[in-house]
Image (cartoon, grey):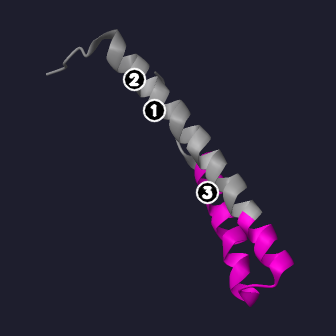
Amino acid sequence: MKVYLGERSRLFRAVLTRFGHRARWAAVWLLLLVWIVTLMAGVGGALAHLFLVFAVVVLLYELLAVDRPA
C-alpha cells in the first residue's frame, strides 16, 4: 500500500537532504580547523592527526552517500 504524503513531505525531505549535506561540510571544515590548531599548538601528538582522518571519513561518506531525489 502506497501512501501519498503530499508536497510538504517532498519539500521537507529536500530540506533535510540539503541540511545533511551542509552539516557534513561544516563538520569537515571544523575538523580541519581543529586539526590545524592542534598541530600549531603541539597538543595531542600523533593523536591530533585523527581529526584529519575523521575529516576524510566524512568527505568519503559525502561522496558515497546516495541522496534520494525529492
Q: How many marks?
A: 3
The residue range painted magenta reads: 34-63
The amino acid type, in three-letter code, at marker 3 is: Val
* Residue at the image position 72 percent from the left and 53 percent from the top: 29
**Disc number lying in front (3 or 2):** 2
Apparent side of residue 35 relative to residue 20 in the rendered image (left or right): right
Provide residue 20's location: percent of width, then percent of height: 52, 40
- Nearest the camera: 4 or 50? 50
Residue highlighted by disc 2: 12
The N terminus is located in which quarter? top left
Residue highlighted by disc 1: 16
* As drawn, 35 above or below 13: below
Crowd around label 2: few <14 · some 14–19 · many ≥20 (10 Å):
few
Q: Which mark is residue 26?
A: none
* As drawn, 28 above or below 48: above
Provide residue 27's location: percent of width, then percent of height: 62, 54
* As drawn, 46 above or below 62: below
Apparent side of residue 68 relative to residue 8 in the rendered image (left or right): right
Disc 1, SS: helix
Quarter occupied by residue 43: bottom right
Residue most extreme to the bottom: 45
Residue most extreme to the top: 7
The amino acid type, in three-letter code, at marker 2 is: Phe
First in residue order: circle 3 vs circle 2: 2
Disc 2, SS: helix
The amino acid type, in three-letter code, at marker 1 is: Leu
Residue highlighted by disc 3: 58
Could you tell me if the residues under marks 1 and 2 are in contact, i.e. CB atoms within 8 Å?
A: yes
CA–CA distance in space, label 3 to label 2:
23 Å
* Residue at the image position 72 percent from the left and 67 percent from the top: 34
